[in-house]
């Protein structure tokens, strides 16, 4: 890097989508400092430290201070920014425990803040048209519009920091990352780009260029004394994001859930005191197909003509579909309104091509015959020919939603079959699956006994009298 800033400041949580993933919505920003030695350029390799398995990327918009800022107002904060560009705030979750939130070891590693490659003049930027995108191996992983997606604006962050810490020309502020951050491995390539429309009215787009970071394994040794990398299931869940498990474990869990019925899952949830996790009033375009996947949410608000610009271009619905990953379910909150379609065949097909496991909406669908020909199921409350703009404004994605009477958070697990859809909290999904499999084995035994003429008295459910017969049936290998 030609320029070495005096300070590199990171923001912990600033995007609604990221805060929703973490289950918290901060009232003000919180910060951490990164050493200037973490700065790197486009094309510089990012080396995963020895013994670490959980290196995660965080695509961000970086602000470069151009004029000294000391206790400036939020209205004036943006005036102290000279340039914006792309940045990537890499960190290793394996070392987060060592510094209790300070991030010195986890994010202070040399080369962990790629930056650039080009600066965009802040004086020419239309803030409403700033866009941040991150790709992993060419696949879009993050796509955000800070003006509508951030909890705290750029000027607000500058002003808040300047209340107690003077910002000098050349200081860099990393403004936080949206949903989509996850683990990358040696051999992967992460790319970040910031684009911005000009405020001249000429409809010209400016770009930071692609900030390219190839991931490699570090060639040095990391020996005691000092904190050594460590990870458990909870740390892995935080690193991988809302799915809560590495891809192979997640795939096995989803496959297992597709093998049990929603009726059984609902029974198991009821035993745990969870009666509000079954969606009401939905039917499937493909009742023959079982669905299991992690929630990717989008929220619609009632139509307001003066806000119809939110429906234009890459609106929240389209962004959610372009961000969807294999094994995810698109969940649409449409307030139960059956008088306009919430999704049709083209976007449904795009979700399928992106690897979606299914679509769930508590509103109507359109192009229903074409949707029924897709491989993935679409659970819906009604069918209607009108476009969503008749009633809805796609407002935001990757937030908690209320769909068919159930609160659904990004990363919750949805399971569907011909009976309907059930939501599983990820933290108990594996436990529920194990108990559901046992319940279905018992019910298969009970069904064979009823079929041969036995009474259900003491059989359904199993009693102390009938349980030995069940155990013998298992021992003979008669269970499916």
Image: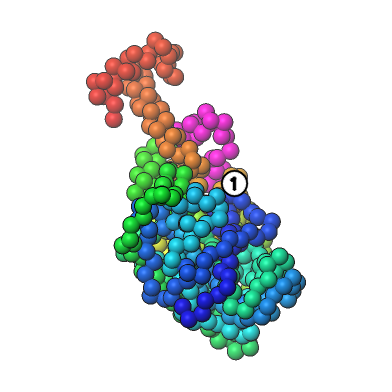
Report the number of discs: 1
**In x, y percent, where is residue 67?**
66, 80
Q: Any magenta on residue 59?
A: no
Q: How crowded is mark 1: few (under 14 residues within 10 Å), some or many (20 or more)?
A: some
**In the orientation shown, which residue stands out farthest toward the left?**
476
- Is residue 66 depicted above or below 102 in this figure? below
The residue at 58%/60% (across/down) is 32
Q: What element carries label 1?
A: strand
Residue lying furthest top in this view?
A: 465
Residue 445: x and y in percent read 34, 22
Q: Nearer the viewer, residue 99 or 400?
A: 99
Q: Where is residue 93 in the image (x, y as percent from the top left)?
A: 45, 53
* Relative to 159, 133 lies left or right: left
Q: Which colour scheme is used?
A: rainbow
Residue drawn at x 52%, y 76% is 4
Residue 117 higher or lower than 434, as above or below:
below
Rendered view: 304 above or below 400: below
Quarter of image, res 186: bottom left
In this rendered view, identify the residue nearer to me: 334 or 252. Answer: 252
Q: Is residue 289 visible?
A: no
Q: In this view, does 395 lie to the left or right of 139?
A: right
User: Is residue 285 inside the magenta stretch?
Assistant: yes
Q: Give the range drawn in magenta.
A: 264-292
Q: Quadrant of the C terminus?
A: top left
Name the residue tied to disc 1: 407
Asked if 188 appears above or below 197 in the picture, the reply is: above
Residue 407 showing in the rendered view: yes
Residue at 64% from the left image edge and 84% from the top image edge: 123
Indicate the position of residue 112 as horizontal and vertical percent values. Answer: 45, 66
Q: In this rendered view, identify the residue nearer to me: 58 or 139.
A: 58
């Amino acid at each position: 890097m030609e320029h070495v800033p005096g300070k590199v400041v990171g923001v912990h949580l600033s995007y609604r989508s990221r805060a929703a993933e973490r289950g918290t919505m901060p009232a003000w920003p919180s910060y951490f400092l990164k050493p200037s030695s973490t700065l790197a350029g486009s094309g510089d390799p990012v080396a995963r430290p020895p013994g670490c398995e959980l290196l995660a990327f965080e695509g961000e918009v970086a602000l470069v201070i151009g004029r000294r800022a000391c206790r400036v107002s939020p209205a004036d904060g943006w005036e102290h920014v000279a340039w914006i560009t792309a940045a990537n705030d890499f960190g290793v979750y394996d070392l987060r425990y060592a510094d209790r939130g300070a991030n010195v070891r986890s994010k202070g590693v040399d080369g962990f803040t790629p930056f650039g490659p080009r600066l965009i003049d802040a004086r020419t930027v239309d803030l409403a048209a700033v866009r941040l995108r991150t790709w992993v191996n060419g696949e879009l992983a993050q796509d955000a519009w800070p003006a509508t997606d951030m909890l705290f604006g750029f000027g607000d962050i500058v002003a808040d920091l300047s209340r107690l810490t003077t910002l000098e020309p050349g200081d860099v502020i990393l403004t936080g990352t949206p949903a989509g951050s996850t683990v990358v491995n040696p051999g992967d390539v992460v790319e970040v780009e910031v684009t911005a429309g000009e405020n001249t009215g000429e409809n010209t787009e400016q770009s930071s260029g692609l900030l390219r970071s190839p991931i490699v394994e570090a060639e040095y040794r990391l020996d005691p004394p000092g904190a050594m990398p460590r990870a458990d299931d909870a740390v892995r869940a935080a690193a991988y994001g809302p799915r809560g498990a590495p891809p192979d474990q997640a795939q096995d869990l989803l496959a297992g859930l597709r093998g049990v019925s929603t009726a059984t899952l609902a029974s198991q949830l009821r035993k745990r005191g969870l009666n509000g996790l079954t969606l009401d009033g939905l039917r499937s375009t493909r009742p023959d197909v079982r669905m299991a996947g992690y929630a990717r949410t989008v929220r619609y608000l009632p139509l307001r003509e003066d806000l119809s610009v939110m429906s234009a271009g890459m609106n929240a619905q389209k962004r959610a579909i372009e961000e969807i990953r294999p094994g995810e379910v698109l969940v649409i909150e449409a307030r139960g309104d059956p008088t306009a379609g919430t999704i049709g065949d083209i976007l449904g097909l795009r979700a399928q091509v992106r690897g979606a496991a299914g679509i769930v909406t508590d509103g109507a669908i359109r192009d229903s015959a074409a949707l029924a020909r897709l491989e993935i199921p679409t659970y819906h409350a009604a069918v209607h020919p009108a476009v969503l703009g008749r009633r809805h404004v796609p407002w935001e994605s990757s937030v908690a939603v209320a769909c068919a009477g159930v609160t659904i958070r990004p990363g919750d697990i949805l399971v569907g079959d011909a009976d309907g859809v059930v939501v599983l909290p990820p933290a108990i999904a594996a436990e529920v699956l194990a108990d559901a499999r046992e319940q279905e084995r018992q019910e298969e035994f009970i069904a064979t006994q009823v079929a041969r003429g036995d009474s259900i008295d003491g059989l359904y459910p199993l009693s102390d009298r009938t349980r030995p017969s069940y155990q013998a049936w298992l021992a003979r290998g008669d269970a499916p």
